[in-house]
Image: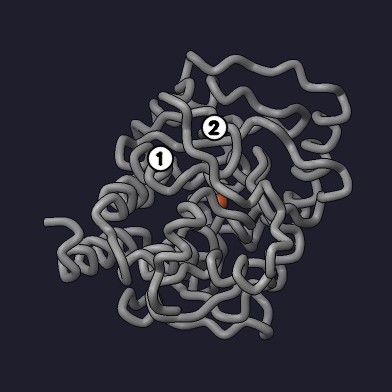
Amino acid sequence: MSEAFTMPDETQAQEATSDEALSAFEKAHAEADGDVDPRTIPQKLDGRPPIGEEIAYPEYPEADHETWRLLVSRQMEQLPGRACEAYLRGQDVLKLEADRIPDLANLSRRLQEATGWTVANVPGLIHEKDFFELLSERIFPSTNYVRGREELDYTPAPDCFHDIFGHMPMLTQPDFADFYQLFGQAALNGEGAIRPKLEAFHWFTVEFGLIKEHGEHRIFGAGIVSSNEEVTHALSDAVTTQPFDPDVLVDTEYEVYHLQDTLFVMDSFEQLLDGFRRWTHQHGLLD
Ligand SMILES: [Fe+2]
């Protein structure tokens, strides 16, 4: 349930003058009092990462493929009837393999055919400017290693199960695909107090978004679809749901390392795209 940006670097975190300017990740790290998993500290990219056909397929040990198989089969027991149609269709469009870790170059080619997105291979959590720049060019940064067997249920940093299985299917949905590129473009212009609001936007949509389908709530956020516990939790009575409203959403508190207790429900992906466009225009982030 991790995310590939935030926590620019220690200097910037220290320079933040008010609590309001700190992201939820920065607050969580400050409270952790030095006990921070190094995988949750973003790295700055050293040059342009390999993209699409430039990405080599690693020689994974068989145990890694087994972990992938296990992760996929556990989630697929839960997702039908809970994940939204666009997400499930996206799995088919990508021809997502259940038996072995997919090849990022193949996924990139299929995404490009679907909505013009491609995939970059990045080493882990990356610095937010690198992350936003890639998104703004319709390039999705993905890891290619899978979590250890002892972290099946939860890993604090991104792995390829989260990045591929969680994020990529939604990039085949045209409105979502446009929204995510727009998010990258807007975020490149975001400074100071608008940063945590952008991060909240990302959190409650890309990572933890719900959508209404056939009068019921369905999940599409990558942090939910890739988490065994969140899938059922997100649709349970333990969660308070609110209708999608950018102005409310950006000021809603959330905790990054716990199950979520408030989620937002979109009527459609068109509503998400239009709502974000309006909100960024109001705040002078995009024309
Ligand atoms: Fe993510």
> Where is residue 43 drawn, in percent x and y?
54, 40
Q: What distance separates the C-alpha of mark 1 from that of mark 2?
A: 10 Å
Q: Residue at x 86, y 23 (%)?
A: 62
* Residue 4 visible, this orientation: yes
Q: Which residue, as the protein is rendered here, is positioned at the far left?
A: 287
Q: Residue at x 75, y 59 (%)?
A: 228
Q: Mark 1 highlights which residue?
A: 130
Q: Mark 2 highlights which residue?
A: 122
Q: Which of 140 and 68 is in front in this view?
A: 140
User: Looking at the image, is 223 positioned above or below residue 194?
Assistant: above
User: Which residue type carries mark 2?
Assistant: Val
SS at circle 2: loop
SS at circle 1: helix
Mark 1 or mark 2: whose residue is earlier in sequence? 2
Q: Are marks 1 and 2 in contact (CB under 8 Å)?
A: yes
When asked about the image quadrant of residue 33, the answer is bottom right
Q: Residue at x 64, y 61 (%)?
A: 81
Q: Which residue is drawn at 78% across and 53% down?
A: 77
> Where is residue 25 drawn, in percent x and y?
55, 65
